[in-house]
Amino acid sequence: MTAPFPFSAIVGQHEMKLAMILTAIDPGIGGVLVFGDRGTGKSTAVRALAALLPPITVVEGCPVNAATPEDCPDWAHVQSRSLVSRPTPVVDLPLGVTEDRVTGALDIERALSLGEKHFEPGLLARANRGYLYIDEVNLLEDHIVDLLLDVAQSGVNAVEREGLSIRHAARFVLVGSGNPEEGELRPQLLDRFGLSVEVRSPTEIAERVEVVRRRDAYDTDRAAFLAKWQDEDATIRAAILAARDALPKVVADDDMLELCARLSLTLGTDGLRGELTLLRAARALAAYEGATAVSADHLRRVAPMALSHRLRRDPLDEAGSGARVARAVDEVLA
C-alpha cells in the first residue's frame, strides 16, 4: 500500500488542516466541508490526516470495524474474538453511487426462499470509526447527501426492506469537497456540516515553488521524504491524542457561552447548531493547545469555519460570508 503524503508536509492551507485536526480530536463536531479550487490538497489532507492517526483495534473479520466482539452485529456471523490493528479507514464515495452501495443491501430473495437474513455491507460499514470522503459533494444527489448527513448525525445505519431490518454502527468523520462554481449545496445541507473552509491556489511564487519541490521529492524518493517528515507528523499525532484525553476537562464558562450566542444572533444564523458547533470547535482547539479553558481567542479563531456557511444570503451586502463573520467577531469579541 502506498504511503500517503505526510500531513505536516502540506504547504499552507492552515485553516483546512486545523479544521481536520479539530474533527480528529472531537468527531462530534460534525465533519468538514472544503470548497475551493481543484488541486489545492483537499483529498491529500484527508488521507494524510488518517494516516497520521494511530491504527484502530478491530475484531478480526468484522465488516464494521467493531472494537470488541460484543459490538459486532449478529448478521455478520463473526466467530473470531481476536483483535487486530488496522489503519484508520478512509472510504471514498463516488458520484453516481446508489443508495444500496452506500447503506448496504439486504438479499430479499434469499430471505424469502431460505429464511436467512443476509446483508451485504456498504460503504458506511467500511467507514465506521474512520473517514468518509466525498469529492464534488455539491454534485451528489440530494437524497444521498441527506442520507449521509442523517447517519453521520445519529451514528447508526439502519436498512429496512420488505419487513426486514438491519442496523449497525456508522460513526465517521464526513469530509466533503467541491468547487462552488460547479454548483452549490442547499442551505439546510450546508448547516449540517460542522465546519466549513475555503481554500485557494497559492498566489505567492515562493509558496508555489515549495509545493512543487515537496511533491517532486515525494515522487522521486518516497522513503526519504517520509523519513524527513515523520518527526513532525509524530508531534501532531501526540498533540491530537493528548487533546482527546484532555477534551472532557476543558471548561467553557457562562461568559463564553454568552459570546457564542451573541455571535450567532448577530449573524442571524437559524437554530442553535451554530453556537453548539462553535463551542465544540473552540473546546477542541483549547485542548489541542493545552489550555484548560475556552477563551475568546479560541472562539475568534474557529468562528469563521463554524459559522460562515450558516449565514442567510443578504442581497444588500456584497461582502462574502467570511467578511460578515469577521465583522461580527470584531463587534462581539472587541
Image: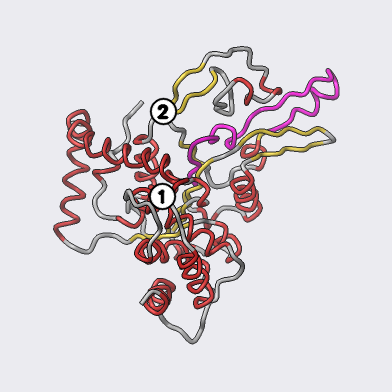
Q: Quadrant of residue 120?
A: top right
Q: Earlier in the sequence, mark 2 or mark 1?
A: 1
Q: Is residue 110 magenta?
A: yes
Q: Position of residue 90 (x, y in %)?
A: 46, 37
Q: Position of residue 74 (x, y in %)?
A: 70, 22
Between 118 and 311, the one lying in front of the other is 311
The total number of labels drawn is: 2
Q: Quadrant of the N terminus?
A: top left
In this rendering, position of residue 294 left or right of residue 7: right
Kindly check if marks 2 and 1 are in contact, taking CB atoms under 8 A apart as contact.
no
Circle 1: is it few (<14), some (14-19), or many (20+) Cα within 10 Å?
A: many
Please give the label number shown on residue 22. Answer: 1
**Mark 2 residue type:** Pro
Above or below residue 161? Residue 333 is below
Q: Quadrant of the C terminus?
A: bottom left
**Residue at x 38% of width, y 35% of height:** 53
**Mark 1 residue type:** Leu
Q: Position of residue 54 (x, y in %)?
A: 38, 31
Above or below residue 50? Residue 286 is below
Circle 2: is it few (<14), some (14-19), or many (20+) Cα within 10 Å?
A: some
How is the model colour-coded? secondary structure
Q: What segment is highlighted magenta in the picture?
A: 105-134
Above or below residue 21? Residue 85 is above
Please give the label number shown on residue 133. Answer: none
Q: Position of residue 75 (x, y in %)?
A: 71, 23
- What residue does disc 2 label? 55
| Disc 1 secondary structure class | helix
Above or below residue 185? Residue 270 is below
Real-space CA distance between mark 2 and mark 1, rounded to the nearest whole angstrom: 18 Å
In this rendering, position of residue 258 left or right of residue 42: right
| Disc 2 secondary structure class | loop
